Image (tube, grey):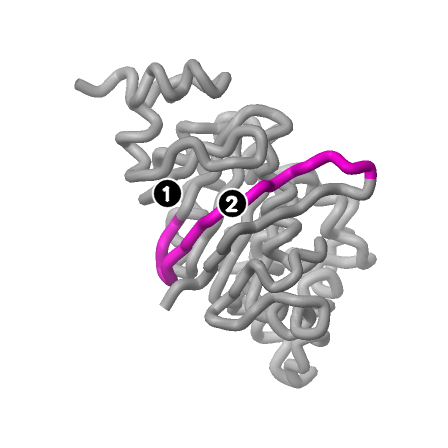
Amino acid sequence: MNAVEIKNLNYKYPDGNIVFNGLDLELKEGESLGIVGPNGAGKTSLLLCLSGLLDTQKMIRIFGKYLDKNIAPQIRKKISYVFQNPDDQLFMPTVYEDIAFGLINLGIRKKDISGIVKSSLESVGMSGYEKRHSHHLSFGEKKRVCLASALARKTRLMFFDEPVNEFDPKGRREFIKLIKAIKQTKLIVCHDLNLVFETCSRTIVLNKGRIVASGKTKKILSDKKLMRENDLEVPYLLMNRR
């Protein structure tokens, strides 16, 4: 089954700016897909469409169901979204409450929530952080809490928007390792092409709201001409390989 299927997606913002004009895309369940492209290509807008936050008039199906305003709340229960800026995602007083909030909205029984929060924090190396104040944490710790919150929901599909932006080198390496360990279907929007090479089996290049290339990650990212034409660069992990 396709986790995501987009057919002839057309979308423009209220000011008349056309974002997508006939975009087609499929994402198979269990696949890890990277979306790369220059600034303004439509990458984050695509994530918003897939999350049901923009009205796409039944041009998108998630796990076989058309995404419209009536069914979007149900479909969003199958999706976890890790934001670029963790302060956009964390809003409760404590780490425990931030993770528990999503579980409560899913209808998880209160007696089960404590164990889920604990195990999700363990999975991202943050055991014992339940009572810590979310906004007193470092940037990297906040990002881990966001990932723990996403993992706690046990959704079938996960979206990442610039997952390692602003990390120091060590934090970046550790967060990439966490992403690689995730078995769910993943869609990763990212300027860090080395991360995409390490985590994604397939990659698409998006530019001016259209897909200009799609294929196996190594082939796409090692294409110097393609990278140059889309204001991208071959990642150093590939430049150093024969």
- The chief SS type of the magenta part is strand
The stretch drawn in magenta includes residue 67: no
Residue 18 within the segment the image draws in magenta:
yes
User: Quick one: which residue is furthest to the left in this view?
Assistant: 242
Q: Is residue 242 visible to the viewer in this orientation of the structure?
A: yes
Nearer the observer, 14 or 135: 14
| Residue 192 position within the rendered picture, expressed as x and y whole percent measured from the top left | 48, 28
Residue drawn at 81 percent across, 43 percent down: 14
Q: Which residue is mark 2?
A: 23
Give the residue at x 45% y 53%. Answer: 186
Which residue range is magenta in the image?
Answer: 15-32
**Residue 197 falls left or right of residue 37:** left
Q: Is residue 240 above or below residue 213?
A: above
Q: Residue at x 76, y 42 (%)?
A: 13
For label 1, the residue is: 200
Instruction: Name the image quarter holding the N terminus.
Output: bottom left
- At numbered mark 1, what does the secondary structure look like: helix, strand or loop? loop
Callout 2: 10 Å neighbours few (<14), some, many (20+)? Answer: some
Position of residue 35 measured from the top left corner of the image (x, y, whole percent): 48, 38
Three-letter amino acid code at the position of disc 1:
Cys
- For residue 188, the mark is none
